[in-house]
């Protein structure tokens, strides 16, 4: 059967973006995005097998949900380069997650999902339980097994942004209430695959922090107004009508956010200029981290867009949480942070912004 080929509605600098959808033998979907249509033949071989089985449980004292996904205990852990599951497949070798010899950018359903579309309803006594219905996808930035958002070309970061936007739409259409694209980087964060990639989770519920943010925006909080009032003391860089900055209420040393100075609810609402600026600042922020800390900086990146149906007054941010407080010192989240949610921040945000501004 021929794989469906689609041209996305948005363009990048006048260039079309193509999406190829391939159904793997275990039923998982693989999407290949590129400026050129991917017409390569599938490499023959047996697909990797997936695991599933998870549930959501409500914590009555904390007022939030946790995912129980025991099948993830056996997920791939720091494989050799020869066994890299995110690389293109080679004829005659075991298939990777991407059964093609080349690609520009790939997205596929996670082999070890925390959330999945067919999760069954579960009954339990003594605690509120619900099906872990949703989506977990892996997004592979490049066929190359080295690099980062800082070393990707601007064109590739724009392609990544358009793929994120397309996945937002697909997950919302599938019934997800909140979609979170994110990236974990570095051993200190717990990364088990070092090939440049991120993930996308589509939740059946709006997690508590995102619910609180949506409520704050709907009550009138104006992040863009705050960012402009803080002035350049807290700014790190700017491009295309967006700024990167250390928020005055940062919880991590050297925490950086990116947002538009004229607010948008999600990246799907970016103008061409804003999309270019956002893609540039993604790479610029990682580049500054690596220059300042003198090493590949362990950090977490997450994109916070409006939950489904709540575009209204929501203001989109991309948030970076580095796990270093100095070049040779890890920022641990220990007893106080874990027990109370109250963070102790070792670096004043204005000093963090000043140091990152001067890093490159």
Image (cartoon, rainbow, N blue to C red):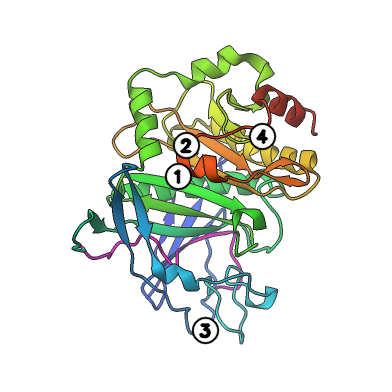
Per the model, the C-alpha gap separating discs 1 and 4 is: 27 Å
Q: Position of residue 301 (x, y in %)?
A: 56, 44
| 70 vs 173: above or below | below
Drawn side of residue 246 relative to residue 147, left or right: left
Q: Which mark is residue 44?
A: 3
Q: Which mark is residue 271?
A: none
Quick check: marks 1 and 4 in contact, CB under 8 Å? Answer: no
Chain-order first, disc 2 or disc 1:
1
State the residue at coordinates (39%, 28%). 314
| 110 vs 179: above or below | below
Residue tagged 1: 165
Q: Nearer the viewer, mark 4 or mark 3?
A: 4
**Disc 2 secondary structure class:** helix
Tell me if mark 3 has few (under 14), some (14-19) or many (20+) residues whose alpha carbon lies within 10 angstroms of its own. some
Per the model, the C-alpha gap separating discs 2 and 1 is: 6 Å
Residue tagged 2: 267
Tell me if mark 2 has few (under 14), some (14-19) or many (20+) residues whose alpha carbon lies within 10 angstroms of its own. many
């Amino acid at each position: 059967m021929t794989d469906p080929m689609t041209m996305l509605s948005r363009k990048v600098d006048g260039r079309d973006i193509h999406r190829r959808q391939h159904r793997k033998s275990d039923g998982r979907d693989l999407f290949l995005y590129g400026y050129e249509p991917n017409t390569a033949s599938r490499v023959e071989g047996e697909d990797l097998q997936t695991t599933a089985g998870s549930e959501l449980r409500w914590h009555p004292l904390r007022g939030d949900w946790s995912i129980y996904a025991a099948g993830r205990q056996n997920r791939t852990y720091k494989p050799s380069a020869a066994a890299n599951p995110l690389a293109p497949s080679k004829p005659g070798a075991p298939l990777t997650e991407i059964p093609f010899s080349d690609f520009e950018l790939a997205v596929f359903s996670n082999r070890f999902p925390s959330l999945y579309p067919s999760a069954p309803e579960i009954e339990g006594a003594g605690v509120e339980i619900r099906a872990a219905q949703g989506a977990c996808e892996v997004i592979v930035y490049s066929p190359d097994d080295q690099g980062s958002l800082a070393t990707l070309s601007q064109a590739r970061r724009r392609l990544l942004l358009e793929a994120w936007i397309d996945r937002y739409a697909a997950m919302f259409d599938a019934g997800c209430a909140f979609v979170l694209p994110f990236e974990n980087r570095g051993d200190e964060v717990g990364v088990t695959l070092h090939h440049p990639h991120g993930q996308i989770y589509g939740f059946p519920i709006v997690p508590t922090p995102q619910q609180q943010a949506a409520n704050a925006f709907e009550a009138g909080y104006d992040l863009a107004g705050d960012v402009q009032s803080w002035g350049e003391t807290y700014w790190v860089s700017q491009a295309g009508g967006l700024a990167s900055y250390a928020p005055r209420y940062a919880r991590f040393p050297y925490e950086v956010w990116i947002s538009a100075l004229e607010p948008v609810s999600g990246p799907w609402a970016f103008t061409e200029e804003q999309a270019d600026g956002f893609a540039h600042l993604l790479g610029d922020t990682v580049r500054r981290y690596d220059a300042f800390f003198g090493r590949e900086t362990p950090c977490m990146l997450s994109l916070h867009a409006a939950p489904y149906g709540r575009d209204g007054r929501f203001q989109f941010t991309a948030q970076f949480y580095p796990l270093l407080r100095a070049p040779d010192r890890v920022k641990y989240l220990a007893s106080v942070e874990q027990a109370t949610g109250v963070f102790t921040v070792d670096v004043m945000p204005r000093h963090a912004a000043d140091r990152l501004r001067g890093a490159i």
